Image (cartoon, rainbow, N blue to C red):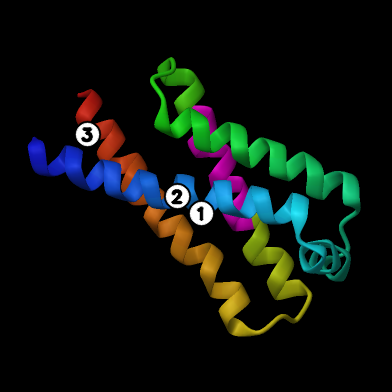
Amino acid sequence: MKATKIFYWILTAIVALMMAFSSYAYLTKPEMTAAFHHLGFSDYFRIELAIAKLIGAVALLVPVPAKVKEWAYAGFTFVFVSAFIAHTVSGDPVANRVMPLVFLVILGGSYFLYRKQRQ
């Protein structure tokens, strides 16, 4: 059980830190604004997504009701799948397409271990 908890927190911290960093980048980096325009998204979506990512990262790290945590996992799943689709349709390089899938796998591992701990 101890190993499960350690791996859960490692995977969860990776996802939460990545989401918090991307949230910060979305709000402060001009190149992220350009990237969103390249993908065909407007500025308000970039800001909305940054706020949602920050809330989701906090929800993964702090003790909240199980339903809130489940929604955070679901939201990040949608974000990673949508990012993969957006980068693929835009014709971005393979690295831009693969990274959302890598984080989706890490998120899946975190979710699997979260569920395992709750049993």
- Within 10 Å of disc 2 (Cα), the crowding (few <14, some 14-19, many 20+) is many
The image quarter in which residue 76 lies: top right
Image side of residue 39 versus residue 106, left or right: right
Which numbered disc, 1 or 3, marks the residue closer to the eye?
Answer: 1
Q: Which residue is mark 2?
A: 15
Prevailing secondary structure class for the magenta stretch in the rendered image: helix
Real-space CA distance between mark 2 and mark 3, rounded to the nearest whole angstrom: 18 Å
Q: Are marks 2 and 1 in contact (CB under 8 Å)?
A: yes
Q: Which residue is mark 3?
A: 116
Find numbered disc 3 in the image and state the secondary structure of the residue it sits on: helix
Real-space CA distance between mark 1 and mark 3, rounded to the nearest whole angstrom: 23 Å
Find numbered disc 1 in the image and state the secondary structure of the residue it sits on: helix
Question: What residue is shown at x 37% (from left), y 44% (from top)?
Answer: 12
- Within 10 Å of disc 1 (Cα), the crowding (few <14, some 14-19, many 20+) is some
Looking at the image, tell me whether mark 1 or mark 3 is earlier in sequence order.
1
Question: What residue is shown at x 20% (from left), y 24% (from top)?
Answer: 119
Image side of residue 7 versus residue 95, left or right: left
Q: Which residue is mark 1?
A: 18
What's the amino acid at mark 3?
A: Lys
